[in-house]
Image (cartoon, grey):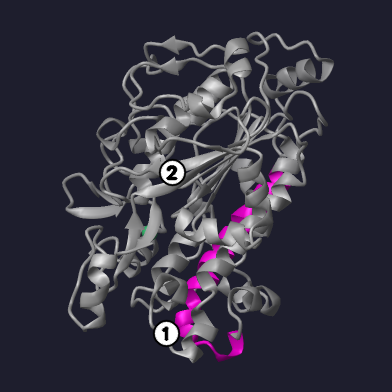
Amino acid sequence: MPEARHKKIPRGARGRRSSPPRVTLVLTAAVLLPMLLALAGCSSEKPHVETPRLLFFGVDSGNWNILTPMIQAGELPNMASLVERGSFGVLKSGVPIQSPQMWTSIATGVVPEKHGIMRFTAEIPGTGREVPVTSNMRKVKAFWNILSEADITVGIVGWWPSWPAEPVNGFMIAQRAWPVNWSRHGIPFGAARDESGRLIVEDFEGRTYPEELYADFEPFIITEEDVTADELSRLFQDPAFTDPAKQFYARWVFAKDKTFADAGLAMLKRFHPDVLALYLQGPDVVSHYYWGYQREEGFTVSPADERLYGRVVRNYYRYVDGVIGSYLAEVGDETTVMIVSDHGFETKRDLKERWERGEKIRTEEGGKDVPWDHGVDGIFIMTGPGVKKNNRLPDMSVVDVTPTMLAYLGLPVAEDMDGAPGLAALEESFLKEHPVTFVPTYETGGPRGDEAPMESPMDEGIKEKLRALGYIE
Ligand SMILES: [Zn+2]
């Protein structure tokens, strides 16, 4: 079970509109007092830290192979504008190029050996049984812990791995708050429903912080059955003619991303956290399943298949661009935006010919029988006050993201982080006014991180998903 959580209301961000939180919970003196102090504008807490509002988008598998031509063709207006108004470049992934490790490196500034998330799964000690990795295994603080301690409010939505949701100065919605499972037989079927069509969701703790927020998140949950015809036709040109099995992958991940994107937007409007991070998985999943239908990548595709599946990857990026646009519309121009990916995605040119001859192949990253997979080159885009405009950056690394965020927000970078702040993204005048400072470490609270993962009722379903993606055996 998750450790005891203090009930803490996500507070409205200082400045701008301050809408009172509507999280239902018993108002004790402990929660009422800080609220009243905040309303009276006389916080008794640590000195006020000047924080710009930061929107952070984690786009799994985001890569310039897709983004550059789409931006040039005017198909991603929001990302195009962010690139034009900001700094951008390649964000190098680590090895192995896998999501839970890399997203944790992004969130901590350290390599997997130090943060302790080493694989997709981990063993329940002494059982030989593997379950998906969980947030309690992380041995170092993530940026949401560091920002929380600095009195900066955060909202973290759907990060991988993020269950159980951690106590933060704000709110967190864990990835496992989306309840859809995969059938044991590899047949995708979504979540179970009762006779009246209501989702049957097994109840367990830690899906949101605070726990009470789950009730507000739940109405946003959709499954692949809820994806509308209109939404479907934006992913597939001819949804009525696509093979349902082939259609499924885009449907379920769209339902997942839409759940988190819509819930995150609603929480942004309501709580105004200083820093809001949203993770989107879809670009990775659709790339695994539909990459090889892209003529742009040099594949030979029948006209019928191209019409049915050839645009799914690019159409998904349009959806992501729309999500980003919907968040931007909610915040002022002074808001800083960061878009990062954990790794890229690419055609494995060396394997393509062998595959076309019908040979059995396997990518270095483990992908079976297809010449496309994760690539080491991800994306980094940053736009905001003090950030250089139209500025192509030297390559950065996933471990540089948190140091960059800390330096930008005026917090010290830790000397024991493996990454360094991406100063090339920042204006000299900004750096003069906000010189980067350092502390030896943020790991002052004693050792953290459990050796063992925690079990949840979703473990088998998540493992089925990872198997279907070829991530685990
Ligand atoms: Zn992937």
Q: Quadrant of the N terminus?
A: top left
Does residue 294 appear in this view? Answer: no
Q: Main secondary structure of the magenta part?
A: helix
Q: Residue at x 43, y 35 (%)?
A: 394
> Is tag 2's residue or tag 1's residue first in the polypeptide sequence?
2
Indicate the quadrant where residue 434 lies: top right
Q: Is residue 252 magenta?
A: yes
Q: Is the CB of the residue bearing disc 1 within 8 angstroms of ligand 1?
A: no
Depicted 284 relative to depicted 397: above or below: below
The residues tagged by marks 2 and 1 sit, at their Cα atoms, a distance apart of: 29 Å
Q: Position of residue 188 (x, y in %)?
A: 43, 76
Indicate the quadrant where residue 44 lies: top right
Q: Position of residue 298 (x, y in %)?
A: 39, 74
Q: Is the CB of the residue bearing disc 2 within 8 angstroms of ligand 1?
A: no
Crowd around label 1: few <14 · some 14–19 · many ≥20 (10 Å): some
User: Magenta part of the protein: which range?
Assistant: 239-267
Q: Residue at x 68, y 17 (%)?
A: 50
Quickly name the residue at label 2.
90
Quickly name the residue at label 1.
301
Q: Residue at x 44, y 11 (%)?
A: 438
Q: Dividing the image into four equal quarters, which quarter contains ligand 1?
A: bottom left
Q: Is residue 192 magenta?
A: no
Does residue 51 appear in this view? Answer: yes
Three-letter amino acid code at the position of disc 1: Val
